[in-house]
Image (cartoon, rainbow, N blue to C red):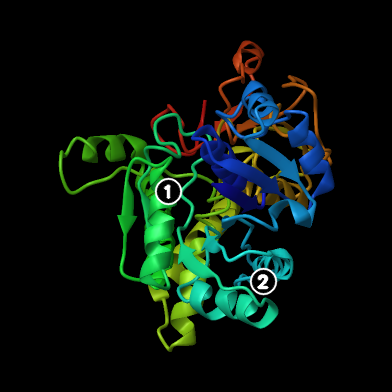
Amino acid sequence: MKVSVIGQGYVGLTISVGAANTGHKVTGFDINYELIQNLIKGDTFVPGITKDTLLELQSSRRLNFSNNHSDFSDSEVIIIAVPTPLTESRVPDLEILSSAALMIANNLRVNSLIINESTSYPGTLRNLIKPIFDSNSEYQFEFASAPERVDPGNGKWDLSNTPRIVSGLTKTATQKAAKFYESFCDNVVIVSSPEVAEAAKLFENTFRQVNIALVNEFAQIANSLKFSSQEAIAAAATKPFGFMPFYPSIGVGGHCIPVDPSYLSFAAEKVGNKTQFINIANKINLSMVTYVVDRIKKEMSNSLNGLRIQIAGISYKSNISDLRESPALNLISELEKYGASVQWFDPLVDLELQGRSKNLVTDIDLGLIVTPHDVFDFSIWKKANLKVFDLSANSKSYGWPKFL
């Protein structure tokens, strides 16, 4: 089957490789010329996808990377996997999704199945994407929603064994989409409408956002009452039913948890439902950087002015390079606001940002562990007897945040 995946970020590249591995002839399309050239050379940024895999799939002609519209014009299946971020005022920004739909509609030359994997609020497929195709193409299309569930760096749950939720605007679209995903996914779950599929994706990550906010508030309570939040969480987790452990952190990052709840809140408020719980969770998680900086100030004689600080890890998650919505960036700004001199080290982030250093150093007053990748060796800090504050969500010490 001829398949094209529009957008070659974490989600799109994962889908392109997964579909090509099972025999589909796939075009991975992106308007970013530099990204496409890097993928052609086998340069990879997604954990689990190797250079050898990209080169082998291309040499066997099962996978073609392109930014040429003609390369997807005869595709039987088109998957839209583009970013759906928030504006500065934290409301949905569907400009990239709308532009992608228009580009596809203007260039597709066959009757195809259009699948949206990009996360958005309920009704996006029916009320935004389909009308764009209806107004800009003479061809007949089927439309389905199958929201992505890619978790970069997860060694247990991948594209094949993570259940896939699917629904089309017609019975035919649902059947075609289900058959397509069944070719590389072990479990395809069909729901009654695209709106249910879209809402399920938002609710999955709203659930995580709310529970992370709850545990972040719990960590603050624990600090005030002088007990270890993480020890209490570990104790609670011994209950074999009715409890799922979450752990405190300086906030939430990535393309899902910080964004999806705002899409759900936006959709709800458009029809008159105020989402108080979601809004409070957003507020708590966004405030964690301020809380942590206040804690650091208290530990450092109530002043950060002139303090030399190094941050270990600035991506939003351990063992990946993604900086999207990373709270570490806000942490840097907040520390600098109080006069601290901040540098950062993250061997996975290939980006020239102010304060970057080539390794962990010891000529500092304080080290902050934010995103501890497996490649880090903190023995240099330990041997130098430096003050270190562990701010990571997977901190091994009881008590959060805590000086080590």
Query: 120 or 54: nearer the eye?
Result: 54
- Taking the view exactly as shown, the residue that stands out farthest to the top is 383
Q: Secondary structure at mark 1?
A: helix
Residue 311 lies left or right of residue 161; in this view the side is right
The amino acid at mark 2 is: Ser
Camera sees residue 101: yes
Q: Secondary structure at mark 2?
A: helix
Which is in the foreground here, disc 1 or disc 2? 1
Query: 162 or 386: nearer the eye?
Result: 162
Mark number displayed over residue 352: none
Q: Is residue 19 above or below residue 404?
A: below
Residue 280 lies left or right of residue 110; in this view the side is left
| Residue shown at 50% from the left, 69% from the top | 142
Query: 226 or 133: nearer the eye?
Result: 133
Camera sees residue 297: no
| Residue shown at 52% from the left, 67% from the top | 120
| Residue shown at 62% from the left, 43% from the top | 26
| Residue shown at 58% from the left, 34% from the top | 371
The spot of residue 7 in percent (x, y) is 67, 52
Could you classify mark 1 by the number of other residues whose Cα lies within 10 Å: few (under 14), some (14-19), or many (20 or more)?
Answer: many
The spot of residue 201 in percent (x, y) is 42, 60
**Quadrant of the image occupied by residue 131:** bottom right
Residue 170 lies left or right of residue 80; in this view the side is left
Query: What is the spatial separation of the Cα atoms under label 1 and label 2, in whole angstroms?
Result: 24 Å
The spot of residue 344 in percent (x, y) is 74, 34
Q: Is residue 171 above or below residue 368?
A: below
Q: Is residue 125 above or below residue 282?
A: below
The amino acid at mark 1 is: Tyr
- The first of marks 1 and 2 along the sequence is 2
Q: Which residue is mark 2?
A: 98
Q: Which residue is mark 1?
A: 181
The spot of residue 320 in percent (x, y) is 60, 34
